[in-house]
Image (tube, helix red, strand yellow):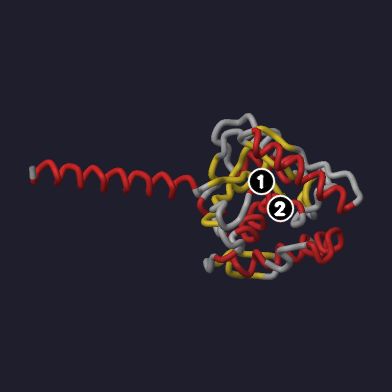
Amino acid sequence: MAMSKLKTIALAFAMMFGVTLVATQSRADTAVLAGGCFWCVESDFEQVKGVSGVVSGYTGGTTPDPTYKQVSAGGTGHYEAVKITFDPSQVSYDEILRLFLRSVDPTDAGGQFCDRGESYRTAIFVSNKAQEASARKAISDAQAQLGQKIVTPILPAAKFTKAESYHQDYYKKSDIVITRRGPKSKAEAYKFYRNACGRDQRVQAIWGSSAPFLGH
């Protein structure tokens, strides 16, 4: 009898643990977005409450397991993109898209800011019908606010290849690189690049006070 009770209690705990585990996993969702230089998009979205991680990588092309050298040279069809992991109980997918569209120039089909070419185009990659509907609404809302045609496409999710380790969290690394202004930490080089590329200046000119990430 005592053994039976122990088994019942153990089963109850196991069931409770299983429910808790599923609930925790269900709170994790992902968004895959291309917004020009992935260093900048990663830097922006790692500031958002509810975002637990942002990974820089490549998606949307045909070359298997592409490298940065291949993607930046063109011809692979890949975008520089980020995979954002977030808790939808803290920040919704709709909000992620709202922030994204107002942190880029969605009227530019040829790249972003000083970065030109196919790998720097903007795009929203969706993995299901719900994400597609959210993306369509986000673009419609942004277009109505902006009063200009938004050319950022909605594309089906494809294989996402994580970029080389030196690209991850580039904006906050302390190791030294050589720039046009001499040796600088990657964090300093990132700030110099972002300013020289005119990203924040252009976003502010387009979106004004709606721009969410100026200066990150």
Name the residue rendered at 58%, 47% in the picture: 83
Above or below, comparing residue 99 to residue 121 in the picture:
below
Q: Residue 184, percent across and down?
A: 61, 70
Q: Residues within 10 Å of mark 1 (few under 14, many from 20)?
A: many
Residue at the spot of label 1: 33
Name the outermost residue toward the front: 1
What amino acid type is highlighted by mark number 1? Leu
181 or 166: nearer the eye? 166
Quadrant (top left, top right, bottom left, bottom right) of the C terminus: bottom right
- Residue 102 in which image quadrant: bottom right
Q: Quadrant of the N terminus?
A: top left
Disc on res. 100 = 2
Percent from the top left, x then y, of residue 199? Answer: 77, 60
Q: Where is residue 64? Give x, y as percent.
A: 56, 31
In the rendered image, the residue lying farthest to the top is 62
Circle 1/circle 2 CB separation < 8 Å = yes
Q: Name the N-terminal-most of marks 1 and 2.
A: 1
Q: Three-letter amino acid code at disc 2?
A: Phe
Rendered position, 174 above or below 85:
below
Q: Residues within 10 Å of mark 2 (few under 14, many from 20)?
A: many
Nearest the viewer among 34 and 181 is 34
